């Protein structure tokens, strides 16, 4: 049975779960890489947890706003709706960063890093696909569109 923590549509759900799985792996790797610098520190784990939670809420709100903006009736109302959700998402990320930099219980750098995960992960997919495409064309395989 599918997990029903959130449900938008199958494509968005699978994309968010894909991102969350990689975020958990990246959090574990970053935690392990920080051990030589800081030792085993709860501040690092809490910073990563706060940043990952803010990133997750950001992505869920983005998915919600994209799906529901098309129901607004006009382009102007859809743009206004998307902009209002952008401000909400920006505020949530700002609050997480402010908490990460203000309270000593969070490692500030580890709070910031997970907010970059979507950019890094999705960009890496594009780079991987481009490299694969160029290698296939270099070694004689034809582009399927031709």
Image (cartoon, rainbow, N blue to C red):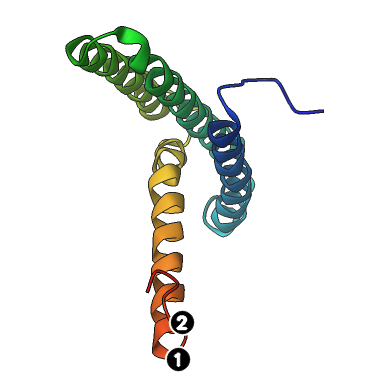
Residue found at the very far right of the displayed protein: 1
Q: Quadrant of residue 102?
A: top left
Q: Residue at x 40, y 60 (%)?
A: 126
Q: Quadrant of residue 46?
A: top right
Quadrant location, the C terminus: bottom left
Q: Residue at x 21, y 12 (%)?
A: 80
Q: Of helix, strand and loop, which one carries label 2?
A: helix
Figure check: 74 above or below 101: above
Figure check: 122 above or below 136: above
Figure check: 122 above or below 106: below
Task: Tell which of 82 and 141 is nearer to you.
Answer: 141
Q: Residue at x 43, y 59 (%)?
A: 124
Q: Residue 114 at x, y = what percent?
A: 46, 40
Q: Are marks 1 and 2 in contact (CB under 8 Å)?
A: yes
On residue 45, the disc is none
Q: Residue at x 60, y 32 (%)?
A: 10
Figure check: 126 above or below 54: below
Q: Of helix, strand and loop, which one carries label 1?
A: loop
Quadrant location, the N terminus: top right
Q: Is residue 62 left or right of residue 25?
A: left
Residue found at the very far bottom of the displayed protein: 139
Q: Residues within 10 Å of mark 1 (few under 14, many from 20)?
A: few
Task: Tell which of 140 and 61 is nearer to you.
Answer: 140
On residue 136, the disc is 2
Q: Residue 118 at x, y = what percent?
A: 43, 43
Q: Is residue 21 left or right of residue 72?
A: right
Residue found at the very far left of the displayed protein: 76
| Real-space Cα separation, disc 1 to disc 2, in angstroms | 5 Å
Q: Residue 3 at x, y = what percent?
A: 74, 26
Q: Residue 57 at x, y = what percent?
A: 48, 23
Q: Which residue is mark 1?
A: 139
């Amino acid at each position: 049975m599918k997990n029903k923590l959130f449900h938008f549509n199958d494509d968005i759900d699978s994309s968010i779960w894909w991102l969350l799985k990689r975020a958990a792996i990246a959090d574990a790797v970053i935690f392990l890489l920080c051990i030589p610098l800081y030792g085993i520190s709860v501040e690092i784990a809490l910073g990563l947890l706060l940043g990952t939670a803010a990133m997750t809420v950001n992505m869920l709100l983005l998915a919600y706003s994209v799906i529901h903006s098309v129901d607004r009736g006009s382009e102007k109302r859809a743009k206004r709706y998307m902009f209002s959700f952008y401000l909400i998402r920006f505020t949530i990320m700002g609050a997480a960063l402010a908490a990460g930099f203000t309270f000593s219980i969070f490692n500030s750098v580890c709070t910031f890093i997970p907010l970059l995960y979507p950019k890094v992960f999705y960009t890496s997919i594009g780079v991987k696909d481009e490299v694969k495409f160029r290698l296939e064309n270099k070694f004689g395989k034809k582009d399927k569109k031709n």
